[in-house]
Amino acid sequence: MKTTKELLSLLKEECINTNRDITGLCAKNYDLVIGDIITVEEFEKLKRYITDNEPSFYKKGMHMFTNSAYYWTIGLRKPRIKWCDLHIKKNS
């Protein structure tokens, strides 16, 4: 099984290299598993990590004002990559 750091690095690369618009981190995680880049167990591990480490503004209820289940606006790569970088560093 890949480490959390390895999974986050793959997630970051998926956010950078995808040819499609980014919807959310969970969708990119799903792309990794359907692309046979990670296993179902690793998918679940990364999904749990994403959920357990939501951005603080999301936990404070900011999503209620955006009327969205996404942490950031759909299509924006930079905040998702920044989140990955932060958590890759935390898991180093």
Image (cartoon, rainbow, N blue to C red):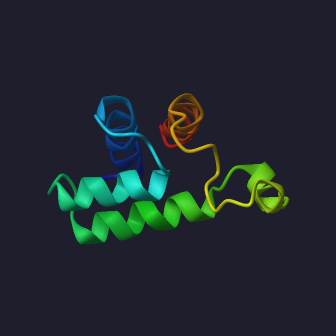
Residue 22 at x, y = what percent? Answer: 44, 42
Front residue of this view, candidates 42 and 80? 80
Which quadrant of the figure has residue 38? bottom left
Position of residue 68 relative to residue 91, above or below, is: below
Position of residue 36 relative to residue 73, above or below, is: below
Residue 48 at x, y = what percent? Answer: 50, 67
Position of residue 55 relative to residue 78, above or below, is: below
The structure residue drawn at horizontal position 37% and vertical position 30%, both measured from the top left corner, is 16
The answer to whether 63 appears left or right of 74 in the picture is: right
Which quadrant of the figure has residue 11? top left
The answer to whether 13 appears left or right of 59 in the picture is: left
The structure residue drawn at horizontal position 63% and vertical position 56%, both measured from the top left corner, is 53
Front residue of this view, candidates 15 and 67? 67
Which quadrant of the figure has residue 17? top left
Instruction: Examine the rendering and report whether any part of residue 51 can be seen.
Output: yes
Q: Residue furthest left?
A: 36
Number of callouts: 0
Position of residue 73 relative to residue 31, above or below, is: above
The answer to whether 67 appears left or right of 62 in the picture is: left
Residue 78 at x, y = what percent? Answer: 55, 28
Q: Quadrant of the N terminus?
A: bottom left
Residue 43 at x, y = what percent? Answer: 33, 64
The structure residue drawn at horizontal position 76% and vertical position 58%, both measured from the top left corner, is 63
Instruction: Examine the rendering and report whether any part of residue 1 can be seen.
Output: no
